[in-house]
Amino acid sequence: MKKVITYGTFDLFHEGHYNLLKRAKALGDYLIVGVTTEDYDQTRGKLNVVDSLMTRIENVKKTGFADEVIIEAMPGQKLRDIKKYGVDIFTVGSDWTGTFDYLKDYCEVVYLERTKDISSTILRSEKQSILRMGIIGTGRIANRFIPEVKLVSGINAQSVYNPNKESTDEFAKKWNLESYYDIDLFFDSIDAVYVASPHNTHYEYVKEALERNKHVLCEKPMALEKAQCEELFSLAKKHNRVLMEGIKTAYCPGFNNLIGIACSGIIGTVRSIEATFTKLENSSSRELTDTEYGGSVTELGSYTLLPAVKIFGTEPENIRFESIYSDNGIDIFTKIFFKYKNSMSTATCGLGVKSDGQLIISGTEGYIKVDAPWWKTSYFEVHHENPNDIEKYSDRFLGDGLRYEISDFLSIINGNSKSAFKLTREESIFISEVMEKFLNERKNRR
Ligand code: CTP
């Protein structure tokens, strides 16, 4: 019996998939079809898959060509499957020609001609109109955003706004965008906005955007006062728009896997979380000279607070801050302590003190250790009492990682809210409350 194997996402099942499976089956007697998981697709950069894994499997089964359906969940699996199932022929469409030649040592490799003018990507963009996105701000993060947005299908970076004409024109030219210094015209040109302006301007811009019925993805910290953050979410609800705070860690696959594992009981009950992020800044930088809104907490606190917020929640019994200040009153190093009923956490951030950027999640039966840059989670270890008993986990973190939050932003706008748990309204509001408490304390000590 000749065994054939093929793999695919099979999203929005179409004629090209049908033809491929039909011809794959005709190559032998028994056809195995590997359908990819959402997590695997995400880690290989395929974002915005619409159908669930179950639906995609059902659609493959319905064709009647597959004798067996398996799940493809990780890189390197193809080779193992070929050996495990005793496969004679590996086949995929001609868009992959050459890619799988390395399998020729183990079986025959056949590239079947792809059906013309149809693909899941085309169907996805037909299904949803392309979202026109505008960017407010032209700084470092805005420059990182554009290449990432290009990787997400269904969304297009359209225009840029900055009251400063010169920097707007330069940015627009660099990224081939429409350039606006008039905010009314800017908002008229878009459906959604990415706010990447200085921290203290976020609230006003987000408010303005929501009042004009635009969806908003706002760089962290979205607001520095709890009441402002609550107001923005209420406004989003009133206007039926999506409002998301862009803490990129919250959306990346590795971090979500980490949180799932921490909460799975594998290290017993989680009792302590220590998260550290330091980034030495030039003393003349905005972060170290803006005495009102600069400093380590406003800059890095959103990241270091996130693990405790995700695992322990938003209702600590006690919050305490300890800082080292520079002469101008800005915190160059801060530890934020949370005490919960039976657990505790520290969030350490520094712009003028360097430390090891680690995340340690400790439980009653072991601990999880994530080295810097844990905020771009790609690898972590689970340790137990026996030092030789270590489990290692890895996920890919692609590029600057903004593609994950952009992709989730788009799917929520398109009515698929399954990613909304990654950073909830309550969590964003709580983080803004912590920022506000900290800034008040800092102000009062002056
Ligand atoms: N395929 C094909 N003809 C098409 C589209 C896909 O033969 N017009 C084949 C692919 O080459 C692959 C299999 O179908 O062997 C599953 O492809 P998949 O990546 O799931 O589908 P695409 O439509 O290519 O998806 P996307 O646009 O997301 O890349």
Image (cartoon, helix red, strand yellow):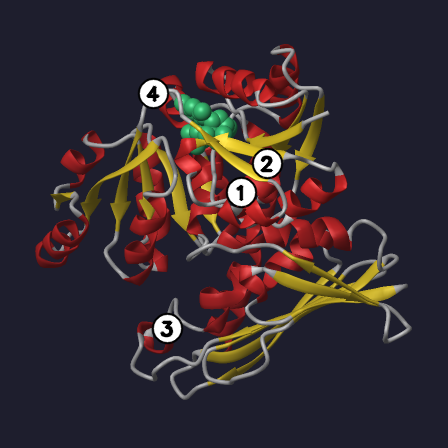
Say if disc 4 is inside 8 Å of ligand 1. Answer: yes
| C-beta proximity under 8 Å, tags 1 and 3 | no
Q: Residue 265, image x and y in percent?
A: 85, 52
- Position of residue 62 in the picture relative to residue 386 (left or right): left
Quarter occupied by the N terminus:
top right
Name the one closer to the observer, 102 or 280: 102
Residue that label 3 marks:
287
Name the one closer to the observer, 397 or 345: 397
| C-beta proximity under 8 Å, tags 2 and 3 | no
Q: Residue 160, image x and y in percent?
A: 20, 45
Name the one closer to the observer, 291 or 185: 185
- Position of residue 250 in the picture relative to residue 73 (left or right): left
| C-beta proximity under 8 Å, tags 1 and 2 | yes
Residue that label 4 marks:
116
Q: Is residue 11 above or below residue 171?
A: above
Q: Could you tell me how far apart the alpha carbons at marks 2 and 3 are, in whole angstroms? A: 38 Å
Q: Which is more N-terminal, label 3 or label 2?
A: 2
Q: Which is more N-terminal, label 4 or label 3?
A: 4
Amino acid type at mark 4: Lys
Question: In this rendering, does residue 238 appear at all?
Answer: no
Q: Residue 424, image x and y in percent?
A: 58, 41
Residue that label 1 marks:
42
Residue that label 2 marks:
38
At horizontal 85% and vertical 55% (from top left) the residue drawn is: 266
Outermost residue, bottom side: 327
Q: Could you tell me how far apart the alpha carbons at marks 2 and 4 are, in whole angstroms? A: 25 Å
Q: Could you tell me how far apart the alpha carbons at marks 1 and 4 are, in whole angstroms? A: 25 Å
Nearer mark to the viewer, of 1 and 4: 4
At horizontal 73% and vertical 37% (from top left) the residue drawn is: 86
Name the one closer to the observer, 371 or 29: 29
